[in-house]
Image (cartoon, helix red, strand yellow):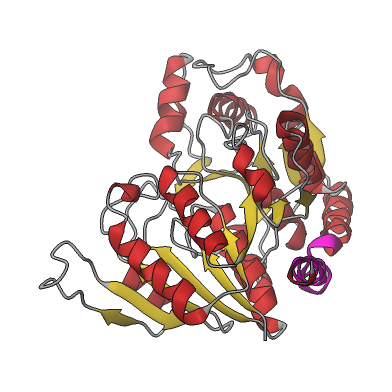
Amino acid sequence: MPRLLLLLPQLPQDPASGAARSMRTIAEFLAAAGWSVRALAVTASESATPIAAADFLRGTGATITVRSPNRTVYKHDRPVLEFTGARGIHYQLLDTGAHTAFSWHEAPSQFNRLYQRELADHKPDIVFGYGGHSDDVERWARARAAGCKIVFGLRNHGYKSAAWLRDFAGVLTCSEYLSGVYRNALGLASIGLPSPLDPDETIAPEREPIFFTAINPSIEKGLFFLARLAEELATRRPDIPMLFIESRGSGGLLVQAGLAGGFDLRRHESLMFAPAVPKPAEIFRGTRALLAPSVWDEPFGRVAAEALLNGVPPLVSNRGGLAEAANGGGFVLPLPASLTLETRLPVAAADVEPWLATIIRLADDQEFYAAASARARVAAAVYQPEVIGRRYRDYFDGILKS
């Protein structure tokens, strides 16, 4: 039986991280195919609001054993959460308390001891994960010294100087777009496979398509574009509701963006806000269309793929891998060239017109919306578990045999 260790520098079930959830789902594909899969990670999250990991995981149905630390030996040790997930993966999660996914590396010694025990006792054939902190790089070296093959999940732009990636058995990106970025930057050979989606977490069992929904209104996700779009839509068509799902970006940030442009979004009753939810299905239950005007070059655009699986047409910007993720099942719309990550004012009203026109037509024209929804479902075929799961299993089988 092949053995895999999933090694992540954050909570594998992190609702604020598509990358973490994708890596966990890939590991679940392998577990379903008969691999022995274990996971070592921490409870730290990217969420703006701290997550009580034990309670959060119990809410997903996990039965957790909390191993208390023996502080007579290591006085700074913390509890470890241990459980076996519904998909057959055995998890050990070091409780990193109030630390975020970006700060817990300040005290990695206990995590390193857990990791060394995994390598010694369970002898994984492949270590699969990501992380470019100096401690992460040292852990990759330990895996190679232990005779493990490493598959690195490359899902962002942050490794353009990481020549050490060339030494690994495999590098998996989340899109052909991102593979191209690293081919140009490092001469790196990688395989681009779409991010996998968990239907149980993603597909709403029932839908009432009401809201035009934007997730995580932050600067990189188009905060200043969304502020203008919200102002124009709420002013012209107050009968069309917009919903903003908060994560790192919040309703407060959106209001501040509007005030910077001279308008107060708080006066519009058609603009609504909701906190982050554990499962994307909860978002898409009430979503009519998804709005994803990302300013940065998205490596993939997971939310667009999630929308497709629900028959929700995604409206995405023409930047990065979003068009690839939409797979012909959405609307690829322009952003003004002047809109960058340094922009700190809402765009001009004219810049949102193509988006506004599409939203209004999707709201008013039922035949147009039905056709768009049907096209989204057809495009979603590439994300069905039986399709994408087979591609990932074939990839890891090839790494094992190489």
Where does the image place residue 33, in percent across and percent down from the top left?
72, 82
Examine the rendered structure and indicate whether residue 351 appears above or below residue 140.
above
Q: Please give the name of the residue rendered at 50% of the width and 34% of the height, measured from the top-left corner.
A: 218
* Main SS category, magenta section: helix
Q: Judge by depth and name the residue closer to the eye, 313 or 2.
A: 2
- Locate residue 309: give its quadrant: bottom right
Q: Is residue 234 magenta?
A: no
Task: Report the magenta residues as a range.
Answer: 382-399
Where does the image place residue 281, in percent across and percent down from the top left?
60, 65
Q: Is residue 393 magenta?
A: yes
- Locate residue 59: give its quadrant: bottom left
Q: Please give the name of the residue rendered at 42% of the width and 19% of the height, measured from the top-left corner.
A: 259
Question: In screen coordinates, is 135 left or right of 325?
Answer: left
Examine the rendered structure and indicate whether residue 35 appears above or below residue 153.
below
Whether residue 7 appears in this view of the structure is yes
Where does the image place residue 335, in percent across and percent down from the top left?
71, 23
Q: Which quarter shows the C terminus?
A: bottom right
Where does the image place residue 191, in percent across and percent down from the top left?
79, 51
